[in-house]
Amino acid sequence: MPAIVLVGAQWGDEGKGKATDLLASRIDYVVKFNGDNNAGHTVVVGNEKYALHLLPSGILTPGVTPVISNGVVIDLEVLFGELSALSSRGIDVSRLRVSANAHIITSYHRTLDKVTERFLGKRQIGTTGRGIGPTYADKINRVGIRVQDIFDEGILRQKVESALEIKNHLLVKIYNRRAITADEVITELLSFADRLRPMVCDTSLELNNALDANKTVLFEGGQATMLDVDHGTYPFVTSSNATSGGALTGSGIGPKRVDRVIAVVKAYTTRVGSGPFPTELFDESGEYLRSKGFEFGTTTGRPRRCGWYDAPIARYTTRINGVTDFVLTKLDVLTGLDQIPVCVAYDVDGTRVDEVPVNQSDFHHATPIYENFPGWTEDITGVRKFDDLPANAQKYVLALEAMSGARFSAIGVGPARDAIVVRHDLV
Ligand code: GDP
Ligand code: IMO
Ligand code: MG
């Protein structure tokens, strides 16, 4: 079972960090293939809580080699901040490998992310402000700075100067900000070069060699299917491919390597930032999910928008990613509810629509058609076998499974590392 891809099924924060951590003891490599420190994964190990942004969650497991591959955009200050915070808590970070082809987030990308959002006013995306969008835009525009560039000062200077030429016009003339000098950017980037050099390699070659040697590699997606730049709720998306295809282009492995695609899905739905969200709740039920599920962003601390489970979205996720297994998380958060509504289809201008509409305006207008499931009151956080869950909790899970297009192989019943019911082995 060499290559496994793990993605988010909804709009992020499904508990991918915990799911990766669950698998980590049986894998050799964990690869982050998209995004950067817009991601926020919380992993609880014993009494310790770790918030990871840039590093793959598998870094917490001894023996696993963490890899940041070419599809990622890297903020070097964040990278070294996270590495030193983990080392000071006794985590061995020495095995980290970083792709020479990954792109670098610079200070001008961060500045542009913030000023562009301000400029958009009401139409803003609600980005995490980390410079993700502008860095990917430069990559596609072929004016990006890559990891390998910081080891050659001449090339770095040439690239930074040419990137700043246009950007400074924008910053000064449109956004009324000060110009950024090439020297300040170059000095900052060069200050990381010596520490970065030993980690940098051809990660595609290393991963393919590992797969040839029958090692198990887990590709851990940041963000989620509905935030994917191609398949999400564009333009309210992140700027990378967070779906399973992104694991291939984002790391340089071929599609035949992948034999399992795991999607992590919450027992309800949340979203941070702007954009359509049919099952969003504006009443006390939403407040209930937010406070009981502790739905506040790991990266920005923003309260997450909350709503009921959306089965058409889960089916869409199965289709776009080729999902083989779901990990359902946060079932415990629903404990105590009398009735649990599940969106089974949408009403779009008076017509029943069973799948996620391809037209963005239709999705904006879609109102959920709900089916109600009876709740349970028993505490389930200590349950480790499916048959020991309350009958109504079992029925809820089986109903979601039947609607979502792939088997539900594991069920999260609490934040702790071991609070999980495994129905089918994932590795
Ligand atoms: P990620 O971005 O997908 O890794 O998810 P986040 O870490 O941003 O958000 C998921 C949150 O849910 C974290 O605080 C986890 O500790 C927590 N969590 C994960 N699984 C469960 C679960 O089954 N039950 C509960 N109550 N919390 C969970
Ligand atoms: P994890 O990996 C939830 C959202 C932002 C914004 C949009 C674009 O923890 O699930 P960006 O800064 O990426 O340009 O913002 O995407 N977003 C996330 N929402 N979880 C995340 O990551 C997210 N990463 C980005 O809120 O709406
Ligand atoms: Mg998160």
Image (tube, rainbow, N blue to C red):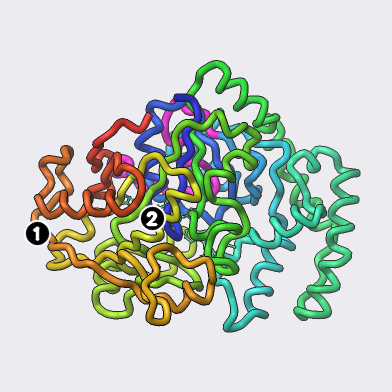
Q: Which residues are magenta?
A: 45-66
**Mark 1, residue position:** 377
Q: In the displayed structure, does residue 374 sit left or right of residue 273?
A: left
| Nearer to the camera, 250 or 69 | 250
Q: In the displayed structure, does residue 335 sit left or right of residue 247?
A: left
Mark 1 or 2, nearer chain start: 2
Percent x, y of residue 354? 38, 64
Graded by Cα atoms within 10 Å as few (under 14), some (14 to 19) or many (20 or more), the crowding at tag 1 reads some
Percent x, y of residue 297? 43, 62
| Residue at point 25%, 41% (across, down) | 420
- Helix, strand or loop under label 2: helix
**Mark 2, residue position:** 314
Furthest residue to the top? 213
Q: Amino acid at mark 2?
A: Ala
Q: Is residue 424 above or below residue 15?
A: above
Q: Residue 128 magenta-drawn?
A: no
User: Would you identify the image quadrant in which residue 1 lies?
Assistant: top left
Percent x, y of residue 196? 68, 37
Percent x, y of residue 14? 38, 54
Q: Residue 55 magenta-drawn?
A: yes
